[in-house]
Image (spheres, rainbow, N blue to C red):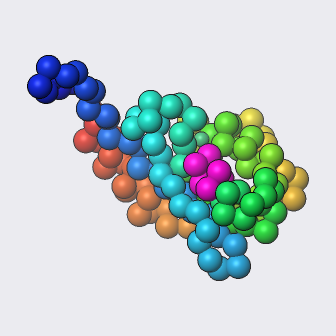
């Protein structure tokens, strides 16, 4: 927390480094990163922001030709959003046994494909480094 010129403002905490992109026809149509701390909004996960941006870019609420790539396994909230938008494929680097949706089974649309482990080592190192610094 800082006080400047009589005004009080809170310094945002560094965001957990999670990013997401939405791709269709080999083209990135949306990209986002976790903004929970910056926006003080628990729904501002990278996936949610990327879904919103992709829907806006395509002018549709369904992303059934799109793939979402994300650093970390989506949480239950994001899995619900991914289910609702009928995303074609979800790819993530690192599983999240503590907060990932898979602890509740497959919450995605039945037609959604899943691929995991892409860039896993790099992403795991980045997340590990982040949480080491935070402690
Ligand atoms: Zn989430």
Q: Nearer the viewer, residue 76 or 7?
A: 7
Magenta segment includes 66: no
Q: Position of residue 61 (x, y in %)?
A: 79, 53
User: Horizontal placement of 92 versus 14: left or right?
Assistant: right
Q: Position of residue 1 (x, y in %)?
A: 21, 24
Figure disc tally? 0
Q: Residue at x 47, y 52 (%)?
A: 33
- Asked if residue 113 can be seen in this view, the reply is no
Quarter holding the C terminus? Answer: top left
Task: State the extent of the magenta-drawn residues as a range.
Answer: 47-53
Q: Residue at x 26, y 32 (%)?
A: 11
Q: Residue at x 68, y 37 (%)?
A: 76
User: Horizontal placement of 92 versus 122: left or right?
Assistant: right
Q: Is residue 51 above or below residue 3?
A: below
Q: Quadrant of residue 131?
A: top left
Q: Position of residue 71 (x, y in %)?
A: 52, 56
Classified by dominant secondary structure, the portion drawn in magenta counts as: helix
Magenta segment includes 49: yes
Q: Nearer the viewer, residue 47 or 122?
A: 47
- Asked if residue 18 can be seen in this view, the reply is yes
Q: Position of residue 81 (x, y in %)?
A: 72, 44
């Amino acid at each position: 927390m800082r006080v400047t010129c009589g005004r009080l403002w809170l310094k945002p905490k560094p965001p957990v480094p999670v990013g997401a992109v939405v791709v269709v026809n080999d083209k990135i149509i949306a990209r986002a990163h976790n903004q929970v701390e910056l926006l003080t909004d628990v729904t501002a996960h990278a996936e949610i922001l990327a879904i919103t941006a992709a829907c806006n870019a395509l002018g549709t609420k369904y992303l059934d030709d799109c793939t979402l790539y994300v650093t970390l396994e989506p949480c239950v909230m994001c899995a619900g959003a991914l289910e609702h938008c009928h995303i074609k494929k979800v790819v993530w680097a690192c599983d999240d046994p503590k907060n990932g949706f898979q602890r509740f089974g497959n919450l995605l649309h039945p037609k959604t494909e899943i691929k995991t482990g892409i860039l896993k080592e790099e992403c795991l190192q980045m997340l590990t480094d982040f949480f080491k610094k935070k402690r």
